Amino acid sequence: MAIPTYQEFSLEEYPIKDLEKVKIGIVRTEWNPDIIESLVSSCQDSLLSIGIDPENIEIYTVPGSYELPLGAKYLLASRQKPDAVICLGCVIQGQTKHDDYINHTIARNISHLSLVSSTPVIFGVLTTNTKEQAIERAGGAHGNKGEESAQAALKMLSLKQKLSNKAGTISF
């Protein structure tokens, strides 16, 4: 079975206004530092290659993946006012169901932050069974989730800008 490929980001397909002013926040974890460093480095390189100003990329560290949503919330409420937040973490299955609880909670809360803030908050968390699988997704045979997360943030920012000129509101 072929591995699905992620559609690469291009400014032609996903234009972003005032790219030089775009601010991106990255919230990363302390756990599994070798894997996280690879995710962060790839994410940052991807943003820089598109033209994001290095001064407009802020990186913050939280203890673990469970703290990613709160770290992202703090960043969204800060004076930095990022245009997008990318959450990078790695939860590797252990001998209990602990990883299921962590993964479901952070996925739900990161999604919730996106919806309530109207700011792209990207779930760049590896949820693997083994460390080897995590390594494969942090620059190995399965690509790099950091790069994919950067591209997802830019695609969502492009969509937000495109639709912000459209009339209409939604309320719940």
Image (cartoon, helix red, strand yellow):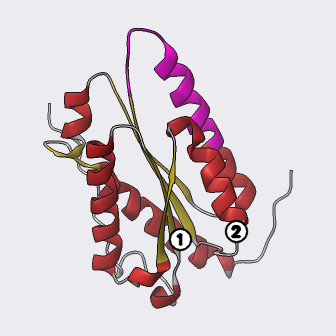
Tag 2 residue: 78
**Real-space Cα separation, disc 1 to disc 2, in angstroms:** 19 Å
User: Local crowd at mark 1 within 10 Å, few (<14), some, or many (≥20)?
Assistant: many
- Which stretch did the figure color magenta? 92-109
Tag 1 residue: 157
Identified at 57% across, 77% down, the residue is 162
**Helix, strand or loop at mark 2:** loop
User: Local crowd at mark 2 within 10 Å, few (<14), some, or many (≥20)?
Assistant: few
Q: Is residue 143 left or right of residue 126?
A: left
Name the amino acid type tagged 1. Answer: Leu
Q: Is residue 51 left or right of residue 102?
A: left
- Mainly helix, strand or loop, the magenta region? helix
The residue lying toward the viewer, choosing from 81 and 117, is 81
Q: Nearer the viewer, mark 1 or mark 2?
A: 2
Name the amino acid type tagged 2. Answer: Ser
Question: Which quadrant of the structure image shows residue 48?
Answer: bottom left
- Any magenta on residue 35? no
